[in-house]
Image: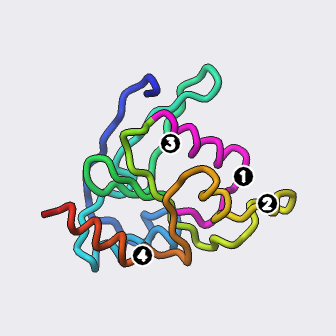
Amino acid sequence: MAKGKIRKRKSRNLTRTEYRSDLEWKVSRQLTEAEIPFVYEGEVLPYIMGRKVHNYTPDFKLGPSTFLEIKGRFVNPDRDSRKLLLVQQQHPEIDLRIVFQRENQALSRDDTTTYAEWADANGFTWAGKGAVPEEWLLEFKGRLH
């Protein structure tokens, strides 16, 4: 595991403007309607890149070790994909899932690999179309009982 302290944040009700994207807002509404408790940006996970400790904040925390990352796109495909890979490798105890807005879109103009292909090749559990699948919602609800 990466050195550094995992920091937790308190849950609170957020307005639409307090989310970083409309897609995150949409997913928060979906989770709320399904009565799944979550904390937006609820935990900071340290990871090591090179010799330096960095911090990664998943978009949603659902329970003690389940996180959702909501991706419209990788702003910097090399950096963003490397960061997620390092977090996945250095925190095997967590369940990190990705919801892509456009899973069939290429990572960049120079790389025709799609987000879905990248996630499959790197062992991520993912969903597309900018929504949490019903199966996941049922799974998350089942963990509550």
Query: Mark 1 or mark 2, which is nearer the start of the sequence?
Result: 1
Q: Residue at (36%, 44%) from the top-left corner? A: 43
Please name the colour scheme applied to the rendered image.
rainbow
Three-letter amino acid code of the residue under disc 1: Pro
Q: Quadrant of the N terminus?
A: top left
3D distance between C-alphas at marks 4 and 2 = 26 Å
Tell me where residue 66 appears, x and y as whole percent: 34, 53
Query: CB of mark 2 within 8 Å of CB of mark 1?
Result: yes
Cα–Cα gap, marks 2 and 1 = 7 Å
The quarter of the picture where residue 52 lies is: top right
How far apart are the two marked residues, 3 and 4, measured between alpha carbons? 21 Å
Q: Residue furthest right?
A: 110
Disc 1 vs disc 3: Cβ atoms closer than 8 Å?
no
Residue drawn where x is 72% and y is 52% of the image = 77
Horizontal side, residue 130 vs residue 11: left or right: right
Q: Residues within 10 Å of mark 1 (few under 14, many from 20)?
A: few
Q: Is residue 83 magenta?
A: yes
Q: Earlier in the sequence, mark 1 or mark 3?
A: 1
Residue carrying label 4: 133
Is residue 86 left or right of 140 when viewed as pictured? right
What residue span does the magenta drawing correspond to? Answer: 70-90
Query: Where 94 sits versus 129, above or below?
Result: above
Q: Amino acid at mark 2?
A: Ser
Earlier-in-chain disc, 4 versus 2? 2
* Vertical relation: 83 (above or below) 144: above
